[in-house]
Image (spheres, rainbow, N blue to C red):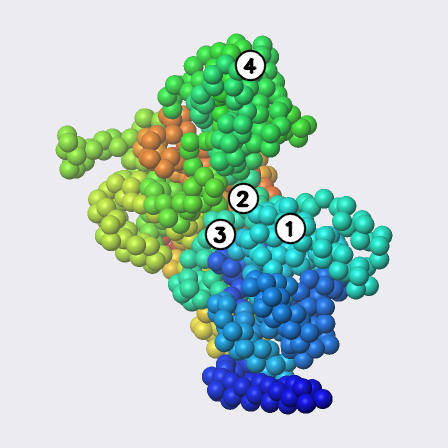
């Protein structure tokens, strides 16, 4: 009895001592505990996501892959799997599981090793959000105290949600929704029971238990969790057996992008980094661009097809690599597969290694380990070897003439499922498409493939525009008093320059001279010598001042007559912006890509307010009596009154000059260097080709009222494209393929004749007023102050009607 009393007293003293010790530790530690109320406003590091204007994902940037969900969005069966794995009494305890802690403590005391653990989900939230990962009793006690405080401050759903979205789950994924995307390529709501259990098993050991790095350990953990779910009554025996028997299908999935628009997404990344610094990567911004999802995919396809077509005209350059053959008796397949796994797929061009060469086919090994064949008629018979950019050799008679085992080649699958021989084009291209009324970028492709080169040729490459620049020279001339009927002699020009021989002798593309030529015809046919003589009369300084209106950088523009031929450098984006001025009636707009930015909570933090064409704003400014009702421009732009809040684009080109230049560029399509575009069967399209010396650059820029598009083709290393390549052969086909689809639903609208312009019959040979009854007379547009006053010399007294019109004007 005495012994029992002594033991009771010791136990009582021990209990009081423990209580006093715990109370003392609480009083000592509690003042330094973080405020758990901040968990309500916690900001998880969430990547930036970039979308098209329709909301399709085209880019994701950030170190941590995370997709936060609310509790109500989490599947119930996954909640059960996680509770079975980590804390089955979560909804019953108040932050700590006393039996669990006692069990973990006894295991530690008895074995000296950490056993089953006693951390609840709430304690793990405390650790993940507030504490370090060091294993000390003091940290554990802080964890317990914080768990109690968290339970007081938040409800169970909020706590579960914090754990679900924060925990690290391997392969840069944080939170279970992100892990679901990384391991299975699907949202967590689309997974099955076995996959839920696999994910629920990862937190215990993310590196060892994730299904990619540790498939065996991960599966064992999965099956244990399934057993716990059965024992807890979450699932029955049949569900358990089916899930345990299910093979795991996990594999690494990158960002689940809707389609490839990497150049556009990278442009957004750079702009967001400039706006927000490193916070752009972690604060969960959602960026909605002006990119049209359908047109972006069409643009990429058109550019790829155009480059492949150009490349096929210039011959086969041979296999991409020649892999060494192993010693006899050694299987080469493992080594070749290793090479294939490290070789990127460029657009749809897949790498393959030739394993056998037959009489009418070659057998190929693909990166997935499968083998197939490329038949003679599937590209092999067309592989005339590349000699120079101007010449190809004789076509082979059989595959063995140019291929052998160990060759790494490129192939693509045709619609019938067969493989076709190809190669990655050495040339590059770019395409920019804008909305003329406000400069919105609807499509941008900066090269053959982002995986091949991240250099954006649409914005970063500075190339000579060649004749693509001529419309701006001619519009400057029209504003300075020249007319579309002005005559300039197409004759040889010899100019002193600073080159080795000190003489520059420019020529037309055909090497011919055509004598006196009207400016309309000179631009339609892209006559170089007329353009040089025109600039000679206009003055280089005046042209550069005119260029400044467009916002182009003119510091390094050559101050000589070569400027008439577009020898300065510009980006494709700048050229497209210039053509937008012609397309929209003469207003300067600035290309923009970001339409709006939302924060993680879906609140709009930025909305673009681009310079927007409002031609009737000019009318209201000049006529105070004009109604305040929304203009037609505003109605077409979308929603009337909101349009009025956008800053009006400034006019930089006379409306009459704009109309005349537009009419000439329509002639380029119907009668000039852009005749291939007649295949589109549209009367409202206009544009201009461009080719530089070499030729090294091929351009086509064109538009209608709804869309302006510029395309460029060339080599990054500035080598020639080939003497038979021009803007009309290399760049125009890309433009046609894109605009055929892009303008499918765009109505054909004819421009109204602006005030102050007249159409008068002239003599095409002299540009003067036509003689009476002159059979070859043509109509030409003139600004009223520039109408010719003299009759073309010849028989007759002149046209009475034409003379009366001229008299009325003056």
> In this image, 798 relative to 560: left or right?
right
Residue 299 is marked as 2
Mark nearer the N terminus (3 vs 1): 1
> In this image, 536 relative to 355: left or right?
left
Find the distance from the CA under tag 2 to the CA under tag 3. Answer: 12 Å
Write down the residue under mark 1: 218
State the quadrant of the N terminus: bottom right
- Numbered disc 2: secondary structure: helix
Find the distance from the CA under tag 1 to the CA under tag 4. Answer: 44 Å
616 or 181: which is nearer to us? 181
- Numbered disc 1: secondary structure: helix
Residue 603 appears in view: no
Find the distance from the CA under tag 4 to the CA under tag 3. Answer: 42 Å
Residue 685 appears in view: yes
Write down the residue under mark 3: 264
Residue 255 sits above or below residue 420 on the image: below
Residue 658 sits above or below residue 468 on the image: below
Mark nearer the N terminus (4 vs 2): 2
């Amino acid at each position: 009895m005495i012994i029992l009393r002594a033991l009771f007293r010791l136990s009582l003293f021990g209990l009081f001592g423990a209580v006093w010790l715990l109370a003392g530790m609480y009083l000592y530690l509690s003042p330094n505990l973080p405020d758990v109320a901040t968990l309500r406003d916690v900001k998880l590091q969430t990547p930036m996501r970039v979308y098209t204007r329709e909301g399709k994902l085209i880019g994701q940037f950030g170190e941590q892959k995370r997709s936060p969900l609310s509790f109500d969005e989490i599947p119930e069966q996954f909640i059960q799997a996680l509770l079975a794995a980590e804390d089955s009494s979560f909804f019953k305890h108040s932050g700590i599981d006393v039996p669990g802690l006692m069990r973990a403590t006894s295991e530690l005391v008895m074995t000296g090793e950490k056993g089953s653990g006693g951390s609840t989900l709430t304690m793990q939230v405390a650790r993940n959000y507030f504490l370090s990962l060091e294993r000390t009793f003091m940290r554990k006690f802080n964890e317990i105290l914080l768990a109690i405080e968290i339970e007081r401050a938040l409800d169970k759903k909020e706590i579960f949600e914090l754990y679900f979205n924060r925990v690290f789950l391997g392969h840069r994924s944080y939170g279970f929704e992100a892990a679901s995307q990384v391991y299975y390529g699907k949202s967590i709501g689309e997974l099955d029971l076995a996959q839920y259990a696999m994910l629920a098993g990862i937190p215990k050991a993310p590196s060892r238990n994730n299904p990619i790095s540790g498939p065996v350990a991960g599966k064992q953990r999965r099956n244990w969790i399934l057993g716990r779910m059965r024992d807890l009554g979450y699932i029955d025996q049949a569900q358990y057996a089916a899930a345990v028997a299910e093979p795991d299908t996990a594999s690494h999935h990158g960002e689940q992008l809707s389609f490839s628009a990497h150049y556009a997404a990278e442009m957004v990344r750079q702009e967001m980094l400039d706006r927000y610094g490193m916070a752009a990567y972690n604060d969960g911004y959602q960026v909605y661009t002006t990119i049209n999802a359908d047109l972006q995919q069409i643009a990429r396809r058109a550019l790829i097809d155009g480059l492949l077509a150009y490349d096929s005209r210039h011959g086969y350059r041979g296999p991409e690599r020649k892999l060494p053959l192993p010693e006899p008796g050694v299987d080469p397949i493992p080594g070749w597969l290793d090479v294939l796994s490290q070789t990127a797929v460029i657009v749809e061009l897949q790498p393959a290694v030739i394993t056998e060469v037959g009489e009418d086919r070659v057998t190929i090994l693909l990166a997935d380990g499968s083998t197939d064949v490329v038949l003679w008629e599937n590209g092999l018979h067309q592989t005339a070897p590349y000699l120079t950019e101007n010449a190809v050799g004789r076509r082979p008679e059989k595959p063995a003439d140019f291929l052998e085992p160990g060759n790494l080649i490129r192939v693509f699958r045709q619609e019938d499922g067969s493989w076709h021989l190809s190669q990655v084009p050495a040339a590059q291209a770019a395409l920019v498409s804008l909305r003329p009324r406000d400069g919105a970028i609807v499509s941008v492709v900066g090269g053959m493939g982002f995986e091949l080169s991240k250099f954006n040729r649409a914005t970063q490459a500075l190339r000579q525009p060649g004749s693509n620049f001529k419309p701006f020279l001619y519009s400057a001339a029209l504003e300075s008093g020249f007319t579309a009927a002005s005559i300039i002699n197409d004759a040889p020009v010899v100019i002193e320059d600073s080159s080795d021989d000190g003489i520059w002798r420019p020529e037309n593309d055909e090497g011919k001279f055509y004598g006196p030529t009207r400016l309309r015809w000179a631009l339609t046919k892209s006559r170089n010598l007329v353009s040089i003589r025109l600039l000679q009369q206009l003055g280089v300084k005046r042209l550069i001042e005119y260029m400044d209106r467009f916002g182009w950088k003119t510091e390094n523009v050559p101050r000589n007559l070569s400027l008439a031929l577009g020898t300065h450098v510009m980006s494709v984006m700048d050229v497209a912006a210039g053509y937008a001025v012609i397309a929209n009636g003469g207003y300067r707009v600035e290309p923009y890509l970001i339409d709006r930015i939302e924060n993680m909570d879906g609140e709009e933090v930025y909305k673009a307010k681009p310079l927007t064409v409002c031609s009737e704003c000019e009318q209201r400014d000049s006529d105070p009596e004009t109604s305040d009702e929304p203009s037609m421009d505003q109605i077409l732009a979308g929603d009337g009154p909101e349009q009025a809040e956008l800053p009006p684009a400034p006019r930089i080109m006379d409306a009459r000059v704009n109309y005349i230049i537009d009419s000439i560029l329509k002639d380029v399509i119907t009668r000039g260097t852009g005749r291939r575009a007649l295949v589109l069967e549209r009367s409202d399209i206009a544009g201009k080709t461009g080719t530089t010396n070499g030729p090294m650059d091929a351009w086509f820029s064109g538009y209608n009222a709804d869309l302006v598009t510029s395309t460029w083709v060339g080599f990054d290393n500035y080598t020639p494209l080939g003497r038979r390549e021009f803007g009309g052969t290399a760049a125009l086909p890309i433009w046609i393929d894109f605009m055929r689809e892009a303008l499918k639903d765009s109505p054909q609208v004819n421009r109204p004749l602006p005030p102050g312009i007249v159409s008068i019959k002239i003599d095409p040979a002299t540009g003067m007023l036509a003689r009476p009854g002159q059979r070859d007379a043509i109509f030409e547009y003139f600004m009223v102050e520039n109408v010719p006053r003299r009759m073309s010399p010849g028989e007759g007294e002149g046209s009475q009607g034409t003379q009366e019109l001229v008299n009325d004007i003056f």
